[in-house]
Image (spheres, grey):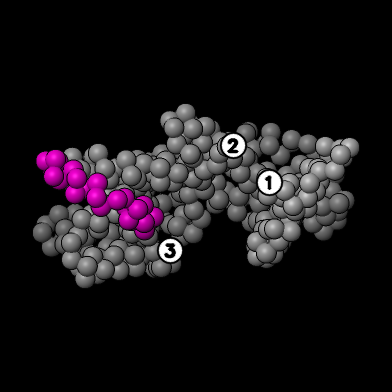
Amino acid sequence: MGVVTAKRPVKPGTAPTEQVKATWQAKLRRDWPLLVMNLPMLLLVLAFWWIPALGNVIAFQDYNPYTGGITGSPIIGFTNFALLFQDPQFLRAMLNTLSITAFQLVFYFPVPIMLALLLNSIVSAKLRAFVQGVVYMPFFFSWVLVVAIFQQMFGGAGLLAQLLRERGYEGVDWMTNSDTFILLITSQTIWKDAGWGAIIFLAALSTIDPNLYEAAAVDGARRWRRMWHITLPGLRPVIVLLLILRLGDALNVGFEQFMLQRSAVGSEVSEVFDTFVYWSGLRTGDLGYGAAAGLFKGLVGLLLIVAANRVAHAMGERGVYSRS
């Protein structure tokens, strides 16, 4: 700002508002290449995020796409939201989603961190590259293939059941057991996504100064002490950031994974927010009702992100965004 003021000195008697306007124009002339580079991204966000978001207005309408559309359907206010909280299926979907999120937060979230620490401790570059390739690969599998693999392993006719029968035990069908469904989907998520999730933590580990480890080793710090006092503090900002994002995505546990296994375990345990929106909105044709459920999910996610970000600021971390 000081450079700009030097190029365009303020004339005597110039109003303060004119000085601010000249500074803004100078900034525009200085940064126009960056703004042009960001223009395609802004257009994509506008076309595929902000303009479609205007369609959330049907959550407040008695929406009928054939007679009135968005402009002609009558406004009914918060009626759809009131009906949502009286719907036992919606409450069940919300309870299932929160239970799955809490369970995966405890049992899935630490796995990529531990996997990154394990990969980082492998000295051989070839062995580390091989292990990374193995653990990354399931991320590229579709949920159809993942469920099929688990069916072959843990289904009623799967490998585990056959081994149990050969040894005189009763075979167990884990794929249709509603009592262990939350364990099943968490195991699938870990197998599919943990390797890919470790990439971010490996990148954070690469930014830690190796001289810190050498200095700690000279001072007599053993392996676990170096991890506790150097590695984990280096990972803490990334852990807090991903934890905030995970909390903001708390009601978005997935769709394909649950739809594929819904018929096997029943909707009592497999109904989550995304499947509820699909069944209540698209399958029944009540799009306003489904939009109300989706909008509620988005608002809860936004509130969770804001709350978690404030907690991160209180703990001295930057969080997802900062006012300064």
The disc at residue 143 is: 3
41 relative to 230 in the view: left or right: right
- Labels 1 & 3 near each other (Cβ < 8 A): no
Residue numbers of the magenta segment = 199-222
- The residue under label 1 is which amino acid type? Met
Depth order, front residue of 146/208: 208
Depth order, front residue of 239/259: 239
What is the C-alpha distance between the residues marked 3 and 2? 39 Å
What is the C-alpha distance between the residues marked 1 and 3? 52 Å
State which mark lies toward you, 3 or 2.
2
- Labels 3 & 2 near each other (Cβ < 8 A): no
- N-term-proximal mark, 1 vs 3: 1
Residue 217 is covered by the magenta coloring: yes
Q: Is residue 41 above or below residue 319?
A: below
Q: Is mark 1 on a helix, strand or loop?
A: loop
Q: Residue at x 74, y 36 (%)?
A: 79
Q: What element carries label 2?
A: loop
Residue 226 visible in the shown view: yes
- The residue under label 2 is which amino acid type? Arg
In the picture of the structure, the residue carrying the numbered disc 2 is: 323
How many numbered discs? 3
- N-term-proximal mark, 1 vs 2: 1
Quadrant including the C terminus: top right
Within 10 Å of disc 3 (Cα), the crowding (few <14, some 14-19, many 20+) is some
Q: Which residue is drawn at 18% across and 43% down?
A: 216
In the picture of the structure, the residue carrying the numbered disc 1 is: 1
Q: Where is residue 16 in the image (x, y as percent from the top left)?
A: 82, 37
Q: In this view, does 286 lie above or below 43?
A: above
Residue 152 is covered by the magenta coloring: no
